[in-house]
Image: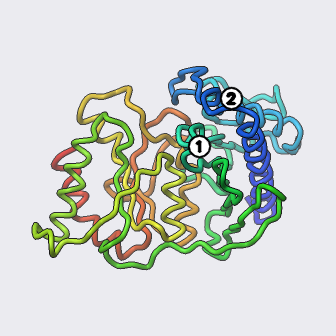
Amino acid sequence: MDGSSAERFRQLLCGLQDAIRDRLVAARAETVSETLAAIVDVTAADTIYHIDRVSESVVFDWFDRCWPTAEPVELVMEGGKEGTPCTFPRGRPLADCRWVCIIDPVDGTRTLMYDKRSAWTLAAIAPRRPDGTRLADLKVAAMTELPCRKQWASDQISGVRGGGRPGLVVERVDVRTGSRTAIDLKPSQGTDFHHAFASFSRFFPAGKSLLAELEESLWRELYGNNAAAGPVVFDDQYLASSGQLYELMAGHDRMIGDLRPQVYQRLGLQQAITCHPYDLCTSFLLEEAGGVVESPLGGPLDAPLDTTTPVGWVGFANQTLARLVRPVLHRLIRERLL
């Protein structure tokens, strides 16, 4: 993918997400929360709510109208039928597709449909590999905030892998007028966790006690048993992987770990809700911003571009924090989860 193609795809993904955001803003103005929260389907990927269906219809309509016909693409999306190829222009053979576009129309559905907190819409593109395209193959990504009713600002982050901070495009959109303002996001440069936010995802009752025990052990080993000498570490359960990545990019959080796949496997909970590749399709934007995102035992995230594979991950605001945590966290995972 050359530079001009990457920039064109970046702009296309941002245009798609502008359409999704604007439609959801309008839908929330017209519809009560209980309607948006109605369950309409349960798939192998997740529970599908009415608000998801609204966003999915925007995606298909936008691809029909706006996707360049000279660039056949396979679409992988939450809410689609797993194992059934979806291509644009519609009806093109999968073998003709040069690209794969993976999309999560709404990441953070549960908080947005009750108007508690922003959700995000995610999309990323990779050259299609006949032997299977993976997270590491993604080249262009965009994520756009889906704000709650009282919020007028929607942040949008997009970029190309390998471009670094100068290659990121970060804008704040006024959803009332459509005006855009460039903003700067920078991960924290803090070197410890004293009076800072650092969390492990434990959104649901399943596995919560084991996750909490592991987290408590991590802080105890890093800072000792003496509560007065240990850090005050703040916890924040942002119920969207993309929202967690944003908090790291924006300098709000210093570490976030999602070990649910490892915990659920340890407990034999095969059907518990966890993170999937479409939730992490924009994760390399954190790396471009200067942060760190990796698998729980280190190394790059590695998963097929699908909507069902469980994926654990750990994100850090900077390498100093990653080097501090890794030895203890890796040992605790091996001792307690594997």
Q: Quadrant of residue 326?
A: bottom left
Q: Which residue is at 78% across, 41% downward? A: 26
Quadrant that contains the N terminus: bottom right
Residue at disc 1, secondary structure: loop
Residue under numbered circle 2 = 53
Compared to residue 144, the image places residue 223 above or below, namely below
Q: Which residue is at 16% across, 49% downward? A: 335
Question: Measured from the top left, where is residue 102 in percent x and y?
Answer: 64, 42
Judge the density around disc 2: few (<14), some (14-19), many (≥20) Cα neighbours within 10 Å.
some
The residue type indicated by label 2 comes to: Arg
> Can residue 244 be seen here?
yes
Q: How many marks?
A: 2
Q: Earlier in the sequence, mark 2 or mark 1?
A: 2
2 and 1 marks in contact (CB < 8 Å): no
Nearer to me, 205 or 299: 205
Residue extending furthest toward the top = 41
Nearer to me, 241 or 303: 241
Disc number for residue 115: 1
